[in-house]
Image (cartoon, coloured by chain):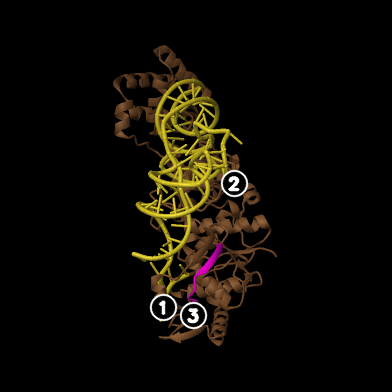
Chain colours: A brown, B yellow
RNA sequence: GACCCUAUCGUCCAGCGGUUUAGGACACCGCCCUUUCACGGCGGUAACACGGGUUCGAAUCCCGUUAGGGUCGCCA
């Protein structure tokens, strides 16, 4: 039997990183087994669901490269969808739920109380066979002991999550439910519901949660909790995918950097870990940076251009050649595109602002004297390609009897306003003599 | 509070009874390379939560304690 898995997010307005990881695991499992990956939108809470919110999910999955075999084709719940188990928006499946409620009522497994419809929950402990954790026995809790039956349709007529989730998994022929461990305890309810419908429940695999570095739950406000963090800051999707795959799953051979194809080939449920993982942004940045370094020159240019414009740098005020040459000096130097504005901004700004503390440290009277001498040598230069700038600087260093370093540092600070940046000589070539001399003069006047 | 899950370097993972002076990666610290940064190379600091068992032998199996997480809604 072919494997059918699903990602069933609720459109809350953002895609949680844990949700993205759940989607990834489902997707990898489907691709690994040749199964079907289904996207279902759980928009039962009509008040807070908007097309905007649905788009956040669709765009997020597309950015990650997680394509779905069945599901919506757009954020419009009424638009045609892909696959023959639709509709894939719960808001469009009301008749199905009504039919299933009636079925339970007929079997006397559901009844009305206080305007709501309740399910007759079994009083016996339920064993949840979980692929990741093993068999988990879930008895009723103290509270449930008082009143084990739970609401499946609210008094306002809206069916609740536990019910629609089970009905849809049943109707859509879901074979494996891979979801966050936060659903483990509730799975007893789901299993009871499946049995009430007279069918075998799907196989369950509850995957461990992603927590903050301090062990707390990652909530909307935490940096990195929303996928937009990564799209906005210019991470590379393959880096995010690679990192996410390694949280709660392991290829067991100490591999770190793996392509999507390698992940698909290696991914399987037995290697899913059982304990929660803490989210380490630093490692993600490293991994994403690895992929960024491998970008083709053209790909890098396009993305860098967009990132710099996004940071409001006036690229259009410069010749295309200039912009391109400036961007090229940054290749392989940054880990994410959001760093580019501060790294290469000096190419596109009229003035460089120099941190007073750095200036005080770097522009000592002695350094200024050297810088002045260098400035005068620069002024006599005839050619302004990188090697000529280098020759001049080294010649001055030679005259002064010092190494290039003590001359490079103040020059870089004067010209770029930063102590780190692209190759100095390249930068000087791109900036051109006019700006270089002007900026050195300004620094000398500090 | 009750129930459930989990527990190896700061973090992510390897380890699934002896081959382990516990391995890799990120981070951190040195050194080298180098015009800065980054990259790369070399080296280093750093962990089996605790207590009982089982066994000739335990990071690995069992029990307890502790800690963390989850669930107990007419939220999803």
Few, some or many C-alpha atoms within 10 Å of disc 2 (few <14, some 14-19, many ≥20)? some
Q: Which numbered tag is attached to residue A268?
A: none
Q: Which numbered tag is attached to residue A147?
A: 1
Which one is nearer the viewer's eye here, A303 or A165? A165
What residue is drawn where x is 66% and y is 50%?
A: A265
What residue is drawn where x is 42% and y is 19%?
A: A377
On the picture, is A409 further left or further right than A163? Answer: left
Subunit that carries the residue with mark 2: A
Subunit that carries the residue with mark 3: A
Q: Earlier in the sequence, mark 3 or mark 1?
A: 3
> Which quarter of the rendering shows the C terminus of chain A?
top left
Identify the residue position indicated by label 3 in the image: A119
Q: Are marks 2 and 3 in contact (CB under 8 Å)?
A: no
Of circles 2 and 1, the one toward us is 1
Q: Whole-percent x and y of residue A29?
A: 62, 57
Q: Which residues are magenta?
A: A118-129
Identify the residue position indicated by label 2 in the image: A251
Q: SS at mark 3?
A: strand
Which of the 4 image quarters holds residue A257? top right
> Which quarter of the rendering shows the N terminus of chain A?
bottom right
Few, some or many C-alpha atoms within 10 Å of disc 1 (few <14, some 14-19, many ≥20)? few
Which one is nearer the viewer's eye here, B5 or A310? B5
Q: SS at mark 2?
A: loop
């Amino acid at each position: 039997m072919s494997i059918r898995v699903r990602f069933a997010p609720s459109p809350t307005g953002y895609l949680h990183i844990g949700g993205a990881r759940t989607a990834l695991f489902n997707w990898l499992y489907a691709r690994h087994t040749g199964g079907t990956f289904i996207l279902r939108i759980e928009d039962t809470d009509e008040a807070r669901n908007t097309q905007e919110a649905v788009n956040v999910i669709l765009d997020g999955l597309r950015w990650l490269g997680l394509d779905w075999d069945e599901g919506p084709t757009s954020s419009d719940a009424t638009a045609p969808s892909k696959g023959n188990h639709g509709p894939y928006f719960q808001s469009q499946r009301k008749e199905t739920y009504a039919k299933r409620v009636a079925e339970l009522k007929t079997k006397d497994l559901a009844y009305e109380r206080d305007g709501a419809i309740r399910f007759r929950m079994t009083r016996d402990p339920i064993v949840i066979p979980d692929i990741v954790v093993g068999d988990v026995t879930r008895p009723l809790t103290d509270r449930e002991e008082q009143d084990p039956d739970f609401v499946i349709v609210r008094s306002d007529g809206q069916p609740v999550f536990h019910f629609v989730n089970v009905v849809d998994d049943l109707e859509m022929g879901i074979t494996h439910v891979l979801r966050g461990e936060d659903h483990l305890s509730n799975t007893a309810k789901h299993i009871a519901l499946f049995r009430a419908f007279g069918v075998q429940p799907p196989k369950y695999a509850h995957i461990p949660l992603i927590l903050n570095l301090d062990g707390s739950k990652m909530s909307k406000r935490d940096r990195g909790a929303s996928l937009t963090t990564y799209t906005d800051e210019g991470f590379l999707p393959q880096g995010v995918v690679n990192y996410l795959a390694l949280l709660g799953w392991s290829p067991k051979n100490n591999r770190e950097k793996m392509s999507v194809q390698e992940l698909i080939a290696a991914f399987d449920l037995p290697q899913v870990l059982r304990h929660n993982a803490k989210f380490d942004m630093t490692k993600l940045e490293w991994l994403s940076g690895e992929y960024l370094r491998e970008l083709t020159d053209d790909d890098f240019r396009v993305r860098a251009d967009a990132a710099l414009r996004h940071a409001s740098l006036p690229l259009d005020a410069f010749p295309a050649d200039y912009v391109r040459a400036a961007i090229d000096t940054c290749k392989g130097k940054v880990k994410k595109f959001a760093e580019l504005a501060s790294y290469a901004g000096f190419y596109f700004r009229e003035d460089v602002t120099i941190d007073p503390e750095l200036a005080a440290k770097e522009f000592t009277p002695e350094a200024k004297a050297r810088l002045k001498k260098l400035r005068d040598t620069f002024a006599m230069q005839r050619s302004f390609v990188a090697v000529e700038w280098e020759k001049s600087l080294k010649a001055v260093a030679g005259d002064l009897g010092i190494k290039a370093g003590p001359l490079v540092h103040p020059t870089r600070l004067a010209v770029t306003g930063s102590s780190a940046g692209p190759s100095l000589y390249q930068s000087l070539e791109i900036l051109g003599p006019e700006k270089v001399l002007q900026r050195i003069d300004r620094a000398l006047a500090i």
